[in-house]
Amino acid sequence: MAPMKVAETRNLKKTYHFGDTEVSALREISIEIAEREFIAVWGPSGSGKSTLCNLIGLLDSPTSGEVLIAGNPAADLTDAKRSDLRNASIGFVFQNFNLVPVLSALENVMLPLQIAGVSKTEAARRASALLDEVELSERKGHRPQKLSGGQQQRVAIARALVTDPALVIADEPTANLDTHNANLIIDLMRRINGERGAAFLFSTHDDRLLDRVDRRIHLCDGAIIEDERL
Ligand SMILES: Nc1ncnc2c1ncn2[C@@H]1O[C@H](COP(=O)(O)OP(=O)(O)O)[C@@H](O)[C@H]1O
Ligand SMILES: [Mg+2]
């Protein structure tokens, strides 16, 4: 049996307008993401990486074309159902972490579970276990500003994983990190990909990371110029 598709795009297009000018951020992107894949989307600044992450992550809507998550066409859903699907199926790691400053590391990781209706006790138990897994056992009570960039990124990854999503999307997860921390983050994502089986799609313009992936999607001016399985 063919592996299940966790996500798929069909002829995905995104055009931004500024007054009279149009910017084609994405042109007719069609890709399939199977279970357990570990994929980098790479290309220069402005090539459309963030736009693609946001569209597959259901954070934004395409100008035309479709996004399907686990076979469900996202455009057919009401906003509420789309949020439910995003919450249940996708973990998103933002480039600048996007942690809630007034919450502790533990409370940040508990948040997606509480939104999904999980009890506080159970949410705390699962969030705590995940913070152990990302080696932040000693930092659970700290607010984001008391953590280093690498530690904040690990909290963000724990938050993305806590609902056990089939797909984790990370927009330049190592862009703000030094080489040591960048490698720790990639090690962590690879380990979780192996152990939990979540598929990963992350954008990067860091060549060093490209040696560590199974598939590379090369974007240039909003189009795929190469989709390479290694
Ligand atoms: N919110 C926006 N409004 C207008 N133009 C945008 C917006 N977001 C991105 N763009 C434009 O779309 C193109 C792709 O941007 P982006 O997806 O951010 O690329 P990357 O993440 O590869 O740097 C760029 O030309 C960028 O200027
Ligand atoms: Mg970007």
Image (cartoon, rainbow, N blue to C red):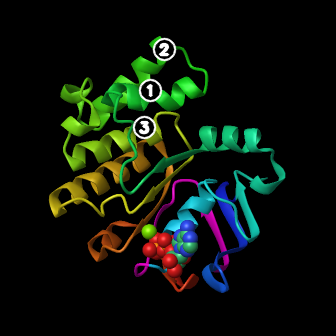
The span from disc 3 to disc 1 (Cα, nearest Å) is: 7 Å
Classify 133 as above or below 58. Answer: above
What's the residue at 79%, 56% (across, down)? 75
**Residue appearing at x 47%, y 20% in the figure:** 123
Residue behind mark 3: 159
Provide the secondary structure element on which disc 1 rests. Answer: helix
Reading the image, the residue beneath label 2 is 120
Query: Which residue occupies the extreme top position in the image?
Result: 121
Pinpoint residue 76: horizontal percent, then vertical percent: 84, 52
Residue 28 covered by magenta stretch:
yes
Name the residue at 28% across, 37% down.
144
In terms of secondary structure, where does tag 3 sit?
helix
Tally the numbered discs. Answer: 3
From this view, report whether residue 24 is shown above or below residue 90: below
Precedes in sequence: disc 3 or disc 1: 1
Q: Quadrant of the C terminus?
A: bottom left
- Between the C-alphas of marks 1 and 2, the distance is 8 Å
Residue 147 picture quarter: top left
Name above or below for residue 67 compared with residue 27: above
Q: Earlier in the sequence, mark 1 or mark 2?
A: 1
The crowd level at tag 3 (other Cα within 10 Å; few <14, some 14-19, many 20+) is: many
Identify the residue under disc 1. 110
Image quadrant where one finds the N terminus: bottom right
* Main secondary structure type of the part rendered in magenta: strand
Which region shows up in magenta?
Answer: 27-45
Viewer can see residue 41: no
Q: Which percent across, then down, holds residue 127?
A: 40, 26
Frontmost residue, 43 versus 3: 43
Tell me the kind of residue under disc 1: Met
Q: Quadrant of residue 54?
A: bottom right
One can see residue 39 in this view: yes
